[in-house]
Every structure is written in structure tokens, then in C-alpha cells.
Amino acid sequence: MEWVETTGDTLEEAKNLALDQLGVAEDDAEFEIIEEPRPGLFGRTRGEARVRARVRPTTPRGKTERRDRNGRGERSDRGERRDGNRDRKPRNESRSRDEAPRPPREKVDVDPAAVGAAAADFLNGLVSAFGTTGQVSVNREGEEIEVRVDGTELGLLVGPGGGTLLAIQDLTRVASQRRLGDQDTRLRVDIAGYRERRRAALGRFAEKVAEEVKATGSARRLEPMNSADRKIVHDTLIEFEGVTTRSEGEDPKRRVVVEPASAEL
């Protein structure tokens, strides 16, 4: 999987920029901290944060630690109760420099065609379970796999704002990539052409906003979006003359800001 490298004033900002480039949520990304800001005088920081990130390899997950019914940690071999909140580390937290690196995951060679076939089988079963009809097709280009479901009356599988579609995509990845141990392919699911229409509509909207920003000279803060939609806006305006884009805020309220290029520092 390819890595991207981003910088920011803080680690959180650098990570969010990487998520925007990858077009995935934080749970689906893997980070490496290259450089952290250093403390300076009067509480200020020096330098910048630099991280590398990539889409998390979709390997089968091991068994998680069992928890008791109250959600607290179970007793250790020494008879002492671990504090689940105290011992738990935030996801994607950087390792200590003195900590030994984790051994590399065992590479499993999986035929992308098998991943696509497993995804198609899962979606065919899902469409039938919903009591509707649809034609499932698989398009593959290198490590990119897109599985499409075309038909009528598929709105229930898309959901408001594509929320159900995103959940179905996650389930499809579990049923195909993770089950087979695939670590290399990028799998997307589109239902009734929703993603294509969404990308086209967001692209037109982004260009309209950019024209307004150029005309008024004032920045425009868009409504909060998920990382995939933010990436569409960034990609649409990356070569749009006279404006620049950035993201601000925290998920799920993270949004894109379109501003005049002269405002870029």
C-alpha cells in the first residue's frame, strides 16, 4: 500500500491532512510519526509535525481481550485487576522511540480476482436479503476494485447521504478482503451509481463556491463532510486558479474551507 506524507502545526492537523488525501476515516488508516513539534519558550512550540500514513492493511483481526459485563478489565495472572481505561492507549498513538518495533505482518498473496468474486457473492446475497433485485458487476484496474450494484429501487441500500452504502462497503470488505487476508487491494462499492452522481454534484458545487470566493475575496466554510467527500472537494479545486483549500475541525464536524490563494501562508 502506498504511503502519503503530510505536515502540520500539530500532530492532529498533520493526521487530518493525511486522512483527506487518503479519503478514508481514521479507523481505516495507519500512521507513523516522523517528527513532532518541540516545546519552546512561553508554552509555544517549535518546528512542525510530520507523519506518514497509508490505508490500514485489511488483515483478519485477532481475538480481542475479553471484558467483563461491566466493561472493566479482567484479572491478570497475578490476581490484580487491570484498569481498562488507564492501560488503554488511543488508537494510532505513536510508539515510544525506545519501544521495539512490531514485527512485520506476514504477507499473504491473494488473487484480486478472488477478492472481487467474494465481494460480488456477498452483495448478491445482501440484495436478495433486502427483497430487491440488482445486477452485481466487478471492475478491476491494478489494485483498485470497484463492485457495482445496478438496478431499480435500490435507494434503501444507499440510505440518507449514502450512510447505508458506507456501512455496506465496510461489511463487504470484511466478507472479502479480511476473510481472505488481502492486504493490497483497494475495494469500493457503488450502488445505483450513487458515488458517481455524488462526485459530479460535489465537483460542481465546489467550483461554484470557488468562483464566489474569487469574486468576493472572502473565505467560505462548507458544511461538515466525511473524509471521502472532503477529498472530492480538495481534488476538484487543487488546480483551480485563485483559490486554495484546507480542512479544519474534528470529525464528525470537520469541514473544508475554501479561501483566496493570497490568504495561503
Image: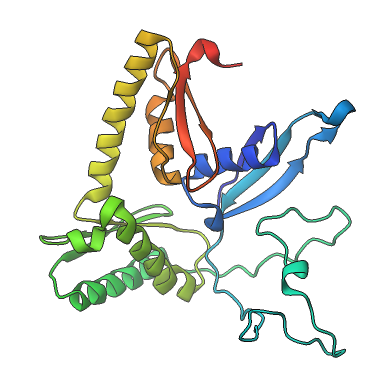
Asked if 265 appears above or below 57 in the picture, the reply is above
Q: How many callouts does the rendering have?
A: 0
Residue placed furthest toward the left: 152
- Is 42 situated left or right of 159 in this image? right
Q: Position of residue 33 (x, y in %)?
A: 73, 46
Asked if 9 appears above or below 166 in the picture, the reply is above
In this view, the residue in front, 60 or 128, is: 128
- Is 187 situated left or right of 48 in this image? left
Q: Position of residue 223 (x, y in %)?
A: 39, 36
Give me the residue at 55% from left, 61% from top.
57
User: Which colour style is shown?
Assistant: rainbow
In this view, the residue in front, 129 or 235, is: 129
Give me the residue at 46% from left, 36% from top.
255
Q: Position of residue 234 (x, y in %)?
A: 43, 31
Asked if 51 appears above or below 59 in the picture, the reply is above
- Is 224 situated left or right of 36 in this image? left
Asked if 184 appears above or below 46 in the picture, the reply is below
In this view, the residue in front, 25 or 139, is: 25
In this view, the residue in front, 166 or 21, is: 166
- Is 222 situated left or right of 104 in this image? left
Query: Residue 5 lies in what quarter of the image?
Result: top right
Quarter placement of the C terminus: top right
Residue placed furthest toward the front: 70
Q: Position of residue 39 (x, y in %)?
A: 86, 34
Query: Residue 104 lies in what quarter of the image?
Result: bottom right
Give me the residue at 52% from left, 68% from top.
109
Give me the residue at 38% from left, 11% from top.
214
